[in-house]
Amino acid sequence: MTRRRTLLSLAAASALAACARDVAPTHWYTLRADPPTPVSPAASASAATPAAGGDVWELSPAVRLPGALDRDTLLVESGSSGLQPLVGHRWAEPLRDSVPRLLLQDLQRLRGAGRVWAAPAPPGVVVARKLTVEVLVLQADAARRSLRMRARWWFEDAAPAATPAAPQIGEADVAIEIADGSVDALAAAHRLALWRLAGFVSR
């Protein structure tokens, strides 16, 4: 009986080892904290944005993202209306967390750390305008080796007014070339698009 149990245990261990060999490893990607290199001539963008001025901003901690991006797996377009998950390629940090954090860092780099704060701003900071950002499209086209980001943002006066002014709305449509068609280059294109968005918002 003992020998039989030993043989069964060895057989089970061998089966598990074989299954482990058959499972493809998971590749993890992140949006790095440091800003990427300047956009190459191949990247194109168009934007309309209100003037930034020299006042202090308070950035909403939640950047709105399309529901399809609320997952860890990297996605690419498929067909006329489909999305294809890249199995085995995952974000180490969900975009819903990394995008707001890095957008804040990028805006602080571009405008100065004392001029952009995450809401709520610390006591003693006099905020002039509240900023909200919404990403409408952030999608890769693998066939064309391009990533598109379309976003809009708006400013509201922080101080209450008897007659509130309409929000100042800005929009940007950014196209980034995916350098070599690899998944690593796809992840890097996401970071570059976010850096470019910060550049438009900070104008």
Image (cartoon, rainbow, N blue to C red):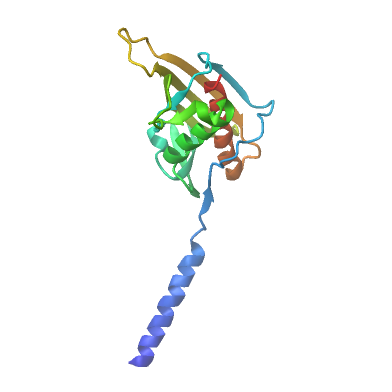
With 130 as the anchor, is 161 left or right in this view? left
The N terminus lies in quadrant: bottom left
In the image, residue 87 above or below residue 63 = below
The answer to whether any part of residue 185 appears in the image is: yes
The C terminus lies in quadrant: top right
Q: Residue at x 51, y 29 (%)?
A: 114
Which residue is farthest right? Answer: 41
Depth check, front residue: 175 or 105:
105
Residue 152 lies, in percent from the top left, at 45, 21
Q: Residue at x 41, y 86 (%)?
A: 7
Q: Residue at x 41, y 42 (%)?
A: 71
Which residue is farthest top? Answer: 163
Depth check, front residue: 202 or 12:
202
Quarter of the rendering containing residue 191: top right
In the image, residue 36 above or below residue 14 = above
Residue 159 lies, in percent from the top left, at 36, 17
The answer to whether any part of residue 147 appears in the image is: no
With 69 as the anchor, is 198 left or right in this view? right
Residue 53 lies, in percent from the top left, at 53, 15
Residue 70 lies, in percent from the top left, at 39, 39
Which residue is farthest left? Answer: 162
Total marks drawn? 0
